[in-house]
Amino acid sequence: MQYQLILRFRKVSIDHPTEIQSLERALTDLLGESATLDGYDTGAREINLFIMTPEPASTFRRSKPVLEQLSLLDKVTAAYRLEGGVRFTVIWPLKYSRKFNL
């Protein structure tokens, strides 16, 4: 099964567009063939980075050192859904209480 893992950042937490590209490169290097980065989109308040993976929780866990290094771990919400699905499961932060939508 394939899942879509979404890393959502508040737009104010990423100062410059090149930061998201640096994050993408670092994650691509780290994750290798275990996951595929599938681009990102920017909205008025947030930036969503999309990752296709068979193991979303493991992929996020492996991504945490990169997010920490870039001072983004405390600024990210991570959620996943089955490819083509509509229901999201939030895995970070641990006590997330709002509904996650795209």
Image (cartoon, grey):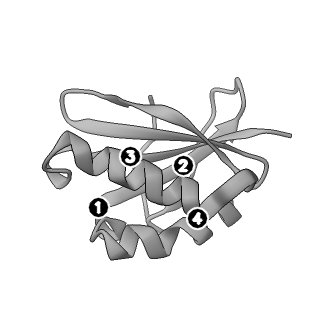
x, y percent for residue 15: 13, 50
The image position of residue 14, as x and y in percent, is: 20, 51
Residue beneath disc 1? 75
Residue at 35% in and 45% down: 21
Q: How many neighbours does mark 3 have within 10 angstroms: few (below 14), some (14-19), or many (20 or more)?
A: many
Say which amino acid is labelled 3: Arg
Determine which of the numbered discs, if any, sits on residue 30 in the image. 4
Looking at the image, is 55 positioned above or below residue 64?
above
Whole-angstrom CA distance, mark 1 to mark 4, is 20 Å
| Helix, strand or loop for disc 4 | helix
Q: Secondary structure at mark 3?
A: strand
Residue at the (69%, 65%) spot, across then down: 58
Which quadrant holds the C terminus?
A: top left
For residue 79, which numbered disc appears in the image? Answer: 2
Question: Is residue 97 among what the camera can see?
Answer: no
Of the image marks 3 and 1, the number of the one nearer the N terminus = 3
Specify the amino acid type for callout 4. Answer: Leu
Q: Nearer the viewer, mark 1 or mark 4?
A: 4
Q: Which is more N-terminal, label 4 or label 1? A: 4
